[in-house]
Image (tube, rainbow, N blue to C red):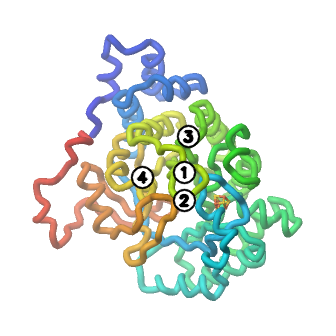
């Protein structure tokens, strides 16, 4: 699918020696170092990165491109932390403008999906004292009792660190309680940038990078899976990104519990970093590719399409990405306050067509990557209308 293949890159006599050494490592399936990760960020051109990342992506997954059908639920959009990149942090001053749902409200939301083929509920939101260990344990229990086939993927170490500290219990005790209550996996949020030089400036006093990693490690030790993210494109330097990727790779070597890495692009609307420009599409694609190359022990790299837009998400499939975030749902509209897609919903048909139009093979998955449906040859009513549009020239 990519315009340049890895063997073509290796045959280029003008390729810089440092980039040739990295390309040869990738060709032989070997791991790159921290210094080489930095070289990629500082010196590697986009076409070269795409060739390496696509080589790894296709070796792992061929053309398969995964998505799931899920819905997001946010108990509150008010937060007592003050992350500078987050629009939620400003709500605490005008709390009455936000929402703070109770257990019954949240169950009402769950029930609106009763007749829909969603397989996962993704729960994240702000941090407030009333959302404690008891609240979340009860919420997980009620969801599982109401709909046992719905996978509960919920909260991040940001919330867990806060609620366990408040309950005066250890991380081990807390995560065990969550598992018993029905939690099935953890999303990757709250990671931002681990390095304290950056984290201390942007993450508003929430859990440290070490605490984030520790909570995931404990969760993995309980036999459970989770994802990881990195918020990039703000005040961090390339060395902070490589440090972040390296810490994830190191923990993954130890536990093997991460499924997917999701780079998150910093968006600059309605937050305290609005003065910063956003990263370019080229930088977004470079970042996907380098993540794919560096994280050799992660199975999947995901593009969160509501954050980068549909076209960049399509392009990302040629730069190491094999997963596009789910059809958030087929009916509701979740409004983003940070400048991402204003109505981030896509029907299953839209998503399948989006994947097929760049020559990839759409597979609907469950949260743990179990195959639910192969959409490669499924026909839609208006397919004939689109005959001839089978690929995006720009991605070839
Ligand atoms: S990023 Fe999370 S912890 Fe930080 S202010 Fe926003 S909701 Fe709160």
Disc on the earlier residue, 4 or 1:
1
Q: Is mark 1 within 8 Å of ligand 1?
A: no
**How far apart, in angstroms, are the residues tagged by discs 1 and 2?**
7 Å
Locate the N terminus and report the quarter of the image it occupies: top left
Residue at coordinates 85% horizontally, 69% vertically from top-left? Answer: 167
Please provide percent x and percent y for residue 16: 41, 14
Disc on the earlier residue, 2 or 4:
2
Image depth: mark 2 or mark 4 in front: 2
**Would residue 262 be seen by someone viewing this image from the given angle?**
no
**How far apart, in angstroms, are the residues tagged by discs 2 and 3?**
36 Å
Q: Are marks 1 and 2 in contact (CB under 8 Å)?
A: yes
Please provide percent x and percent y for residue 340: 45, 58
Locate the C terminus and report the quarter of the image it occupies: top left
**How far apart, in angstroms, are the residues tagged by discs 3 and 1?**
35 Å
Disc on the earlier residue, 2 or 3:
2
**Would residue 234 be seen by someone viewing this image from the given angle?**
yes
Q: Residue furthest right?
A: 168
Residue matched to label 3: 297
Label 2 sits on a secondary structure element that is loop
Mark 4 closeness class: few <14, some 14–19, many ≥20 residues within 10 Å: many
**How far apart, in angstroms, are the residues tagged by discs 4 and 1?**
17 Å
Mark 1 closeness class: few <14, some 14–19, many ≥20 residues within 10 Å: some
Instruction: Tell me which image quadrant ligand 1 sits in.
Output: bottom right
Left/right of residue 23 with respect to residue 124 in the rendered view = left
> Relative to 180, does residue 277 appear above or below in the rendering?
above
> Relative to 237, does residue 169 appear above or below in the rendering?
below
Q: Does the residue labelled 4 lie within 8 Å of ligand 1?
A: no
Residue at coordinates 75% horizontally, 63% vertically from top-left? Answer: 175
- Label at residue 270: 2
**How far apart, in angstroms, are the residues tagged by discs 2 and 4?**
17 Å
């Amino acid at each position: 699918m990519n315009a340049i293949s890895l063997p073509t890159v290796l045959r280029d006599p003008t390729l810089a020696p440092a980039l040739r050494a990295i390309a040869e490592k990738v060709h032989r399936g070997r791991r790159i170092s921290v210094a080489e990760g930095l070289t990629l960020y500082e010196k590697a051109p986009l076409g070269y990165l795409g060739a390496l990342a696509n080589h790894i992506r296709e070796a792992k997954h061929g053309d398969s491109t995964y998505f799931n059908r899920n819905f997001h639920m946010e108990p509150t959009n008010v937060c007592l932390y003050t992350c500078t990149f987050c629009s939620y942090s400003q709500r605490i001053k005008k709390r009455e403008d936000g929402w703070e749902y109770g257990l019954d409200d949240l169950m009402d939301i769950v029930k609106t999906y009763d007749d829909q083929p969603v397989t996962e509920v993704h729960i994240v939101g702000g941090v407030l004292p009333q959302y404690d260990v008891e609240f979340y344990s009860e919420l997980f229990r009620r969801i599982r009792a109401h709909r046992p086939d719905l996978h509960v993927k919920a909260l991040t170490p940001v919330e867990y660190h806060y609620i366990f500290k408040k309950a005066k219990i250890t991380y081990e005790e807390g995560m065990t309680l969550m598992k018993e209550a029905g939690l099935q996996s953890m999303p990757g949020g709250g990671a931002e940038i681990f390095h304290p030089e950056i984290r201390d400036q942007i993450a508003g006093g929430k859990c440290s990078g070490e605490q984030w990693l520790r909570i995931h490690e404990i969760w993995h030790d309980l036999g459970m899976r989770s994802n990881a993210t990195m918020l990039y494109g703000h005040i961090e330097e390339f060395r902070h990104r490589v440090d972040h990727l390296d810490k994830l790779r190191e923990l993954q070597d130890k536990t093997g519990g991460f499924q997917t890495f999701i780079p998150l692009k910093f968006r600059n609307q309605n937050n305290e970093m609005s003065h910063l420009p956003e990263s370019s599409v080229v930088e977004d694609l470079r970042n996907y590719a380098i993540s794919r190359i560096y994280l050799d022990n992660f199975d999947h790299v995901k593009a969160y399409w509501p954050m980068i837009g549909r076209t960049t998400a399509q392009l990302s499939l040629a730069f190491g990405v094999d997963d596009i975030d789910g059809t958030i749902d087929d009916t509701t509209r979740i409004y983003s306050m940070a400048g991402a897609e204003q109505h981030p919903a896509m029907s299953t048909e839209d998503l399948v067509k989006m994947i097929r139009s760049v020559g990839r093979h759409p597979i609907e998955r469950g949260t743990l990557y179990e195959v639910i449906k192969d959409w490669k040859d499924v026909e839609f009513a208006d397919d004939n209308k689109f005959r001839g549009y089978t690929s995006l020239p720009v991605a070839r």
